[in-house]
Amino acid sequence: MKPNLTIPKCSTPELTDGEFDRALAADHDAIVPSSGFADSVMAAVSHETSAPVPLAFPWVRALPGLVAAIVALGVLIAAIVVLLQSAPARHAAGLSISLQTFSAPMFRQAPDVLWLAVSLAISAASLLFCRRLISSR
């Protein structure tokens, strides 16, 4: 058995253009900003327009440092490749390189590495000292 369902007819009155415009222009749903809102927005806009243009990144000054870093990375990779190729054949054949293979050239050049570390530490300390002097003003 099917229930007898009837769909009610919805009769909506036709809106004329005048009634539609009157409904949209009604003041009862108007949104009013708080007092001073427009003034604060205009003050913020005028402050932003009077601000100086942000500075561009100095790529011309940064480029030598980037090139030096890329060259240093290339030299480091080349040094690792040369070190790995100069390893004894018995270690290379077994694909196991001992720590002694890596540390032997470093111990022969220990005084040079020590002086390099000392000079880098002195340079870093002087740069940090100068930076601290500049930021304290």
Image (spheres, helix red, strand yellow):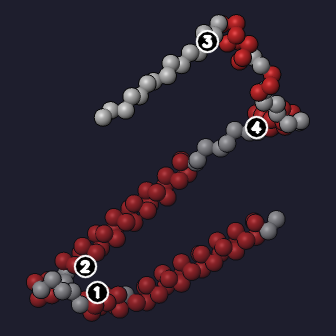
Q: Is residue 12 above or below residue 66?
A: above
3D distance between C-alphas at marks 1 and 3: 92 Å
Foreground tag (1 vs 4): 4
Instruction: Bin the neighbour count of mark 1 within 10 Å (Cα to Cα): few under 14, some 14-19, many 20 and up.
Output: some
Quickly name the residue at label 4: 48
Say the numbered circle drawn on residue 102: 1
User: Which amino acid is tagged 1?
Assistant: Phe
User: Which amino acid is tagged 2?
Assistant: Leu
Q: Position of residue 45 (x, y in %)?
A: 78, 34
3D distance between C-alphas at marks 1 and 4: 59 Å
User: Which amino acid is tagged 3?
Assistant: Pro
Say if residue 88 shows up in the picture.
Answer: no
- Tell me which label, 1 or 3, sits earlier in the chain: 3
* Residue 79 occupies quadrant: bottom left
- Tell me which label, 1 or 4, sits earlier in the chain: 4
Q: Secondary structure at mark 3?
A: loop
Q: Is residue 35 left or right of residue 94?
A: right
Q: Is residue 84 left or right of residue 9?
A: left
Instruction: Bin the neighbour count of mark 2 within 10 Å (Cα to Cα): few under 14, some 14-19, many 20 and up.
Output: few
3D distance between C-alphas at marks 2 and 1: 8 Å
Quickly name the residue at label 3: 13
Residue at horizontal 72%, vertical 17%? 23
